[in-house]
Image: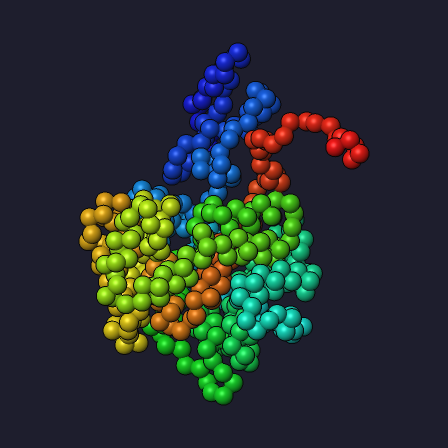
Amino acid sequence: MTTERKAILNIEGQAPVEFPIMSPTHGNDCIDIRTLGGKTGLFTYDSGFLSTASCNSKITYIDGDKGELLYRGYPIEQLAEHCNFLEVAYLLKNGELPNAQEKKTFENTIKQHTMVHDQLTRFYNGFRRDAHPMAITVGVVGALSAFYHDSLDISNPEQRSISFNRIVAKLPTIVAMAYKYNTGAPFMYPDNELGYTANFMQMMFGTPCEKYKPNPVLVNALDTIFTLHADHEQNASTSTVRLAGSSGANPFACISAGIACLWGPAHGGANEACLQMLEEIGDVSRVGEYIKRAKDKNDSFKLMGFGHRVYKNFDPRATLMRKVCDDVLKELGLENDRLFKLAKELEKIALEDPYFVEKKLYPNVDFYSGIVQKAIGIPTEMFTCIFALARTVGWMTQWEEMISDPEYKIGRPRQLYVGAARRDVVPLDKR
């Protein structure tokens, strides 16, 4: 909301210009500069939008200094302890946690949308068997708009709600099918007797030969991963979804754009990069060598899965995933596995070594979630697909919030042009 405070901009040769200051529920006050260009003929330059609020939002808040993450005001620690992923999805979509009946109704609604159009399954045959599952997921999700024409009117709240339910329900099916296609195994239909996460696991790991029996410890671990990745404020992929949606693009196209952005190694590919790093180190005996390299400013090697751009303290999601990680390794008897022993040794050093403690390079959520997924049996190339599956809830919520905002406009960032000045073309015979 706008306060009575004003920011005064003094520009040499011009009269001072006033701008209102907006105050949030949490976080930094913002100077409303929407009239800057009209009043002064100037723009601001903010590469990477590090000091720019691109929207107002009621969904997620992060305090990186405190290590705090809130969904609709609720701390992530409490949500992960007391709620399953679909309860969190309901919260993000509707603004409040469901009561028992609302939870049951919402879960049943999602179950009704888990199947995909049979014609869509033929899309997979157009990809190479060794295609990266993220490439497949981007293409198949983008194609959903060719099948569900009855919910593409973005001005209709009911159709937007149907699109939300459809895409949240179908992402596990689409992602599991990408995995099955890679392995050459037959696609598994959804089993509506199972919960959301258990159903995804049976589509990933089940076969038509026998009834799949979910392990509750592993289901809880993956469900927690989904919850911790459901939304994360205005990150690169969420901003991509909002920017694509600002043009009036259909929600399936917007989510496909978000998945494509998430695929980048600087964003959603971090947990995959973490496992690749562990494979490179190879053995506990080489940890000291790589720790030394990580401290060397002249060495290009970096410890993946440590530190976070947003969290300047401990990543609150990592605290939760650390316990989940221990539970999974114990359940599967993998405490002495080569790769996981190596990961635990790296964790120990990062939490005790003065260099890492001083720089606050603590293990982040990607470090632990990568280990958990590897232990469950999910291949590293699928990690970002799992991330996308979970983040779709946040993307759709952010998209809906933007479309519903009466102030929303098509995104059109300005630029600081530093190319050639105006010049004339010289005819070819005179060059």
Of residue 65 and residue 419, the one placed in the foreground of this image is 419
The answer to whether residue 57 is seen in the rendering is yes
Q: In this view, does 324 lie above or below 253?
A: below
The chosen color scheme is: rainbow
Percent position of residue 48, x then y = 48, 39
Residue at the extreme bottom of the image, as rendered: 209
Percent position of residue 418, x then y = 58, 30
Residue at 47% x, 19% y is 9
Of residue 305 and residue 240, the one placed in the foreground of this image is 305
Residue at 48% x, 25% y is 20
Residue at 61% x, 38% y is 412
Q: In this view, does 310 lie above or below 227?
A: above
* 150 sits left or right of 208 in the view: right
Percent position of residue 19, x then y = 49, 23
- Quadrant of the snapshot with the C terminus: top right
Of residue 85 and residue 262, the one placed in the foreground of this image is 262
Percent position of residue 131, x then y = 56, 68
Q: Is residue 21 above or below residue 214?
A: above
The answer to whether residue 344 is seen in the rendering is no
Q: How many marks?
A: 0
Of residue 276 and residue 203, the one placed in the foreground of this image is 276
Residue at 46% x, 77% y is 205
* 154 sits left or right of 206 in the view: right
